[in-house]
Amino acid sequence: MKRINNDLLASVDSSAIQLPQYDRAGVKPGIVHLGIGAFHRAHQAFYTEAVLNQFGGDWGIIGCSLRSASVKTQLAEQDGLYTLVERGPEGEKFQIMGAVQQVVVGPEDPAALVAIMANPQTQIVSLTVTEKGYCHDPATGNLNLSHPDIQHDLGNLNAPKSAIGYIVAALLARKESGQSSFTVLSCDNLPNNGEVLEKVVLQFAKQVSAELCEWVSAHTKFPSTMIDRIVPATTDSDRADLEAKVGYRDEGMVVAEPFTQWVIEDKFCSARPQWEQVGALLVEDVTAFEKMKLRLLNGSHSMLAYAGYLAGFETISDVMTEPAFVALCKKFMDTEAGPTVKTPDGFDIEDYKKQLRDRFANPGLKHRTWQIAMDGSQKIPQRLLETLREQLASGGSIEVISLAIAAWFKYVSAVDDAGNAIDVQDPLAARLKSLCDSHPNTSERVAALLGVKEVFGEDLVGCSAFAAAISAWLDAFAKQGVLATIKQSFSA
Ligand code: CS2
């Protein structure tokens, strides 16, 4: 079967598949994106593609992988082209995307990537490097100076490894060559992601020189963004299914839900694509949108992922076939996360919550609970613990959050109800497992895990109501299993 590429494009049936509407060869790159995973290809690249289709402009994307060469292998032979499959309850829509012009793999030639970022043609450096890619301490937001990649980059700024190292190296090159700065656009699920990024970049720059730190602070902009689209990892069966339907092979395809949202703080150093003309919202302050999304969508997601995995469900849409889980999710939204969220002007929160549950139930998305369960130590503070602190302060319910944390504690013990090993992917996995193993008694185990300051800060270890609620759920899980516990405690 032929691979999709520039030559094949002319023979693709444009009545069934949307094609790039512009001359790709005439577009120069204006965006360098760090972390070209499935999410970027279905989200920011999708908006940029819409801008290119409608208005043209030099907004081609150079996609970068900071670790593996797999996306380059997928896209290089396809001239950067790939198919976005939008899969909803009403069926599928196909679009071939042309915005990504080149894929660069950092470790293959770090200096070359720094040079691409430092090229004055680059107006925006955007990022989806996941929470742990910020190399910060999630509880304080400070750059973790003892992080091995940061240690490496401080000593080898000409050949960095971390996204932060690359950004500082490129900004230094811009400064030294007398060029203006670029905008650094975080598109990761962190609250105030622009501020978090600015803080770690400035802290890194300060280690290089006070002068660089001042220059970056004066000239570089770090807008915050709220990004939203559910994009599960692509599977072999997705690729085979696409091939059967469209008659070409596409190794770089991505599958996403129809829903998409992007709210961007309108704070750029120089030009940017007209994203607001193609559905994005450019606003003065994204905080309300970010909080709403992180606490309601991502908070529910993490809770459903840990409890759902332990209850034996492979995907989030499978979890949502169990009425007790739907009731659990609704209770979390209505009585715990929802009350802490200040709705952005004009937003109907009831409708938003209902829409989220419908999105989770989308049977076309095989979004594995195991995938969302990854990196809990980096996600839980902003998804669940900020809500918890506000609920504790206002005397609100903490029942479901305690269940979610109990499920996480059971998950990181790395053994499920049936005694099977769990493949826990988390930078703190080894430490969390060893804390579980060395504390067989439930309340002692809970106290030990709540003592992990990078996740729980200094305050929660002493919160006896929280510890008691987690212990009670863990005891119930041990007695009758996670599924039976949830069925017994939550009903529609
Ligand atoms: C998910 C997110 O993997 C995860 O942790 O919660 O990737 C989620 O699908 C997106 O934030 C949706 O916008």
Image (cartoon, rainbow, N blue to C red):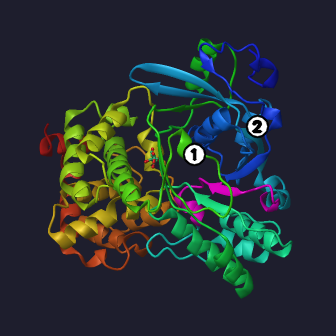
- Image height check: is 163 above or below 48? below
- From the top left corner, tell me how far across and down residue 439 is, in percent: 33, 68
Residue 132 drawn in magenta: yes
Which percent across, then down, holds residue 70? 71, 41
Q: Earlier in the sequence, mark 1 or mark 2?
A: 2
Quarter of the image holding residue 34? bottom right
Specify the segment rendered in magenta: 117-134
Residue 79 in view (yes/no) = yes
Image x and y of residue 442, in percent: 25, 64
Indicate whether residue 315 is drawn in magenta. no
Quadrant assignment, res 250? top right
Q: Nearer the viewer, mark 1 or mark 2?
A: 1
Residue drawn at (66%, 12%) of the image = 13
| Amino acid found under the numbered disc labelled 2 | Thr
Q: Read off the residue under disc 2.
A: 73
Q: Is residue 481 visible?
A: no
Q: Secondary structure at mark 1?
A: helix
Specify the quadrant of the image occupied by residue 173.
bottom right
Mark drawn on residue 154? none
* Disc marking residue 275: 1
Q: Amino acid at mark 1?
A: Trp
In the rendered image, the residue lying farthest to the bottom is 210
Is residue 348 or residue 117 the one in the foreground?
A: 348
Near mark 2 (Cα within 10 A), the count class, few <14, some 14-19 or many ≥20, is some
Q: Is residue 483 left or right of residue 456?
A: left
Q: Residue at x 66, y 46 (%)?
A: 36
Number of residues whose C-alpha sits closer than 10 Å to that of mark 1, classed few (under 14), some (14–19) or many (20 or more): many
